[in-house]
Image: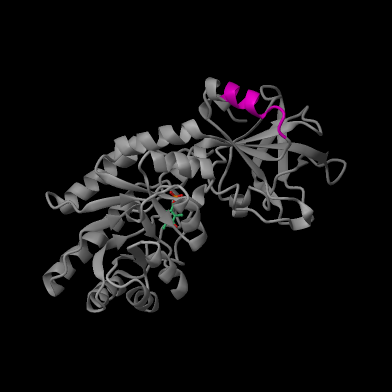
Amino acid sequence: MFNRADYVSDKDWQKFLSFSKDLETPNIVINLHTIKQNFIRLKDSFPYARIYYAIKANPGEPVLKMLSEMGICFDIASRYELDRILKFDVSPDRLSYGNTIKKAKDIEYFYQKGVRMFATDSKEDLKNIAKYAPGSRVYVRILIDTSATADWPLSRKFGCHPDMAYDLIVMAKKLGLTPYGISFHVGSQQRDIGVWNDAIAKTKYLFNSLEVEEGIRLSMINMGGGFPANYVEPTNNLSEYAREITRYLEEDFGEEMPEIILEPGRSLVGDSGILTSEVVLISRKNNTALARWVYQDAGKFNGLVETLDEAIKYPVITEKDGGKETEVILAGPTCDSMDIMYENIKYKLPIDLKIGDKLYWLTTGAYTSTYASVEFNGFPPIKTYFME
Ligand SMILES: *Cc1c(COP(=O)(O)O)cnc(C)c1O
């Protein structure tokens, strides 16, 4: 159904096969070299931007180590991510506490560790920042509804209406904080580049009105993530994203371009991963059923949670590809009936697929390894391996 070469080069595939041949399944193998290339490509596409890697996408220590040595900054969501990144001697001025939902004592912890950059989207959180991280730079996240065109929307829960963002910036100044800028996230795996235009226009409006009416000059736009990885559904290339988004910024800000921050997660690490599973059982629900159920040892609870609502569509390949294929329903190994990855979307697998065969889930480097249960049904979390 899928052409492996559209996703992984021959060279990387050979490297992967020899690296992974003796590993027990299920497992994820991350190709660090791919992440490095993706980072360089992103930097070249947005030469004016500072890049904060959203750690949650793949917090593997070899990933963090490599990226920190390449000079990247980090977007952090919890004190545990902070502890992890501090192991790599990253100075705190390269860190941003980007989660708008945080405990007062965690704000204090970040402040003690030297972090001076905080996201917010509410009054209560802003008051806590003023109290426990006095004088810090704050940026306010605005709400963007992007659910129509993002595969993993991230809307509703985060951000506030621009009118409220305005009030928060004014309040931040009164509380002795440094109003730094505006952030947004257009939704993860955002396939419609035009959504950035909308978000940038809202930001421009806030920059203007705050300067004219309040004398507050913001200096930064944090454009979040949303850049694509290579799944089944096609997207534009990163270079098209960069060209369009840069044009929107130039149209709105012209000569007075603020500092630009990007927070990529999926687009840096998604393409780096291959999840290998083993077929546990193949069956049919009645004697004349056309679709086979293919149960394998990875599922919603150990690595494939982003198949919820069949949102993220991973290319799946086997060693028997190339011949006749029939429809399958792909399910995981646990005793939970929601542990089904694809049922409405019709995946096809080789007719001669057998129990014990391997399935390769491509583009599984983001939101897989740690986005998993601890031991539901006794199954341990999926193991990750890193290949240079
Ligand atoms: C998850 C997240 C990101 C990363 O988004 P991607 O679409 O994976 O690039 C960036 N910023 C924030 C605040 C996030 O929560």
Look at the image and tell me whether residue 150 can be seen. Answer: no
Query: From where the camera sits, is residue 76 visible?
Result: yes
21 falls in the magenta region = yes
Image quarter for residue 383? top right
Q: Where is residue 237 drawn, in percent x and y?
A: 38, 35
Q: What range is drawn magenta here?
A: 13-23
The residue at the point 49 percent across, 41 percent down is: 63
In the image shown, does 194 or 115 lie closer to the viewer? Answer: 115
Q: Locate residue 257, reporting x and y percent.
A: 17, 51
Q: Which residue is drawn at 27% across and 76% down?
A: 167
Q: Would you place residue 269 above or below residue 87 in this image?
A: above
Estimate the x, y position of residue 166 in percent, counting from the top left. Answer: 25, 72
In the picture, measured across the screen, residue 83 lies left or right of residue 90, that is right
Find residue 306 and report its horizontal and vertical position in percent.
58, 51
Would residue 104 appear left or right of 221 to someone viewing this image?
right
Q: Which colour scheme is used?
A: one colour
Majority secondary structure in the magenta region = helix
Q: Is residue 243 left or right of residue 85?
A: left
